[in-house]
Image: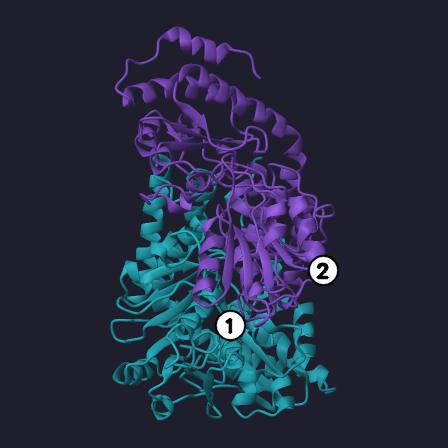
Chain colours: A cyan, B purple
């Protein structure tokens, strides 16, 4: 075959400026190297008893420890699943199994669809859901959670960081409220993991969902943290895998990859300052060149890599199309709802009008994003906005201010 | 990195005689070659709108057509899932959504745990399940299905081929019975796919489950056939992937691999005669050398690759341990329940005593199994059985009969 992993990035990757790391991320070469032996050589079923399965079992245990390490959790508190959505659905299904005395759920209005749709499904089955609003900056206060807890509350399910705006919720305070009231807390940390520190010794959440492909591991694998002592019901039913807690032959190459990626993410947490600097430089540069531009979301209580911005008088989708033409990959929010003509439920919950929400795009950076990528965007985005507004494109001097201005 | 896919099989693989293809299969080098670009280069989220996602979307469509091709189905009738278990659970969940007038299910007693456990879960929720028995050869008649159908039957869920014995059920006749009575039929074809022909133009099943890793594609991906016009409810809820029928970012490398593997499996269907010849040669050779040995399952209504045999007076687990010591990987049944000390529910349903069931092992071949592998087993297995029975090992002449005897 003669295929070699050292061939390097393709032409497409060289030409593309990728600003959609919240949608998915490229596979880290180290992650590919870690998983490849489990595609080529160690492909035994991990449930098998023979010697051939031993390296597979060992790798599964190591990956579990690596994912636990990213969260400061114990390996036996990690279940592997098929995706972040399955992890989130599994958590909510658990709430649904708590019995007739616990039929109330608490979610924020800005949760990912994997959370929202499951809760809406339970609503149709007779559960009651309290949807907590957010303020104009996308923030939610722990006090809001406390105020709505009831004796029949089965679970609070609130994301650690928002996928569209990057806004961070006060997870420690929320978890403490839930702990005090004896209510289960699930948090969707799909976007937070690897971007901000997650220490489950400090944050007493009961359940936490992760997705591998948001942190430079492949698609098709997720994890669910289940704190020791938490009541648990499987969502996928069948074989006794994952200690009887998730049926289905484990995706070993994917799990090994996720373990490796979790370890890399942990080691790269210190670098997130650089990502934040680039992101802030981008936002400042754009603000200088573009009037009628708003950053959606709190200026600091936000993931270091995410920038969601509204451009007065234009359609976000049209801008994305123009960006795509100059090789910039970005999105208007969740990739899961691409193609929907509905304004983002996240931005609407923050009080943006439908028009404002539809004028927004999301730029999300990664550790592979370079200063050159940012400069490229600073060079092209303002003129594309101007063109879409029917204005004369910006003059070179405004570009030079942005691309050589100080980082803040 | 300098890793190359042309390095060939590892030392472990060269030394190992793998007789557990019903548990999992090795990744086909062609499948790895097909999926690798989707790990390295084309890693965009398939839901994204930009150019970078186009090759990913195209590959997803192609894989869907390839999997449909294996079943003689239409591409839009194929959903990709995270594993066979998820496919099966999704089918049964559908039955559970049909409303209060349809709360009766029909399963065979020998279904895989992914089917059994979900049905048992529904039983606990108030559904009624009729469990159909099998005869001493593991067979089930379509007439048995007809006899138990009721106006409130929501679904019949019966496997195409049994994972432990390889026994084939008369799926066309069963499907026709269900069609006549207007009852949904799901069939678990995880073990049948690629081993026998599946033509859904002739077999009017409504739903059919597949797993990629049983046909030389990686773990972590499955598929569910949903015939056009079948009522459908998602099991994983969230984003609008898979036409709104299965939420969660698609495992593109896995899906591409499954598509490629489906095409290869289709092209290899003609070779299954060779696998059957090897398997029959093995059974005949062992029968000649070992007294008190029974083949569990019908002699011909059986997958060409599967041999389940009981050895009077020994424990299957002890034999497997001895086989492992001489480099033979085999199992006592479903890998999903390895470690369980319970006798197989499949063999018990066929009327074997607990002791007989516990004296059984399963040998499952693949297209990579060689005559040399069979001869190796014919050389070692009889003496291991004899030793475990406390008998003198067999003499060389009996070995030579087996390893040079005619194929039958």
Q: Secondary structure at mark 2?
A: loop
**Picture disc at residue B228:** 2
**Picture disc at residue A114:** 1
Residue B330 coordinates in the image, percent (x, y)? 41, 33
Residue A357 in view in this figure: yes
Establish if B343 lies above or below A248: above
- Quadrant into which the N terminus of chain A falls: top right
Residue B81 coordinates in the image, percent (x, y)? 55, 57
For this rendering, which residue is in front, B164 or A311? Answer: B164
Q: Are marks 1 and 2 in contact (CB under 8 Å)?
A: no
Residue A206 coordinates in the image, percent (x, y)? 32, 73
Q: Residue at x 60, y 86 (%)?
A: A357
- Quadrant into which the C terminus of chain A falls: bottom left
Establish if B85 lies above or below A39: below
For this rendering, which residue is in front, A113 or A395? Answer: A113
Side of B215 relative to A271 (left or right) = right
Query: How many neighbours does mark 2 have within 10 angstroms: few (below 14), some (14-19), or many (20 or more)?
Result: some
Residue B70 placement: quadrant:
top right
User: Which chain's residue wears label 1?
Assistant: A
Establish if A248 lies above or below B338: below
Residue A219 in view in this figure: no
Residue B170 placement: quadrant:
top right
Q: Secondary structure at mark 1?
A: helix
Of labels 1 and 2, the one closer to you? 2
Side of B102 relative to B377 (left or right) = right
Side of A356 relative to A266 (left or right) = right
Establish if B325 lies above or below A311: above
For this rendering, which residue is in front, A130 or A392? Answer: A130
């Amino acid at each position: 075959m003669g295929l070699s992993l050292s061939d390097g990035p393709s032409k497409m990757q060289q030409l593309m400026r990728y600003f959609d790391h919240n949608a998915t991320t490229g596979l880290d070469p180290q992650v590919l190297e870690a998983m490849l032996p489990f595609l080529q050589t160690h492909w035994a079923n991990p449930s098998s008893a023979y010697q051939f399965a031993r390296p597979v079992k060992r790798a599964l245990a190591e990956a579990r420890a690596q994912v636990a390490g990213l969260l400061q959790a114990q390996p036996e508190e990690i279940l592997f699943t098929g995706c972040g959505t399955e992890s989130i659905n599994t958590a909510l299904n658990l709430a649904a199994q708590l019995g007739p005395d616990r039929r109330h759920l608490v979610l924020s209005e800005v949760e990912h669809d994997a959370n929202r749709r499951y809760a809406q499904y339970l609503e149709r089955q007779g559960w009651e859901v309290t949807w907590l609003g957010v303020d104009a900056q996308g923030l939610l206060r722990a006090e809001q959670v406390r105020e709505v807890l009831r004796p029949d509350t089965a679970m609070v399910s609130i994301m650690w960081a928002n996928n569209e705006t990057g806004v961070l919720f006060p997870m420690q305070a929320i978890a403490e409220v839930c702990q005090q009231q004896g209510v289960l807390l699930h948090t969707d940390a799909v976007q937070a993991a690897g971007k901000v520190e997650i220490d489950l010794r400090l944050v007493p959440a009961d359940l936490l969902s992760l997705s591998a492909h948001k942190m430079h591991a492949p698609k098709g694998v997720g994890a669910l943290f289940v704190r020791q002592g938490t009541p648990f019901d499987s969502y996928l039913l069948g074989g006794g895998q994952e200690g009887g807690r998730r049926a289905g032959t484990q995706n070993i190459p994917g799990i090994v990859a996720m373990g490796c990626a979790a370890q890399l993410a942990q080691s790269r947490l210190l670098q997130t300052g650089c990502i934040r600097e680039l992101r802030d430089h981008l936002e400042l540069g754009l603000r200088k060149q573009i009037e009628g531009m708003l950053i959606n979301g709190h200026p600091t209580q936000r993931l270091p890599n995410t920038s969601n911005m509204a451009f007065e008088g234009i359609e976000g989708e049209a801008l994305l199309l123009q960006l795509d033409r100059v090789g910039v990959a970005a999105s208007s929010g969740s990739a899961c709802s691409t193609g929907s003509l509905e304004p983002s439920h996240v931005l609407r919950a923050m009080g943006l009008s439908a028009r404002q929400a539809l004028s927004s795009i999301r730029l999300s950076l990664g550790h592979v994003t370079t200063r050159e990528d940012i400069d490229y965007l600073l060079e092209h985005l303002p003129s594309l906005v101007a063109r879409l507004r029917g204005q004369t494109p910006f003059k070179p001097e405004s570009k030079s201010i942005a691309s050589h201005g100080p980082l803040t």
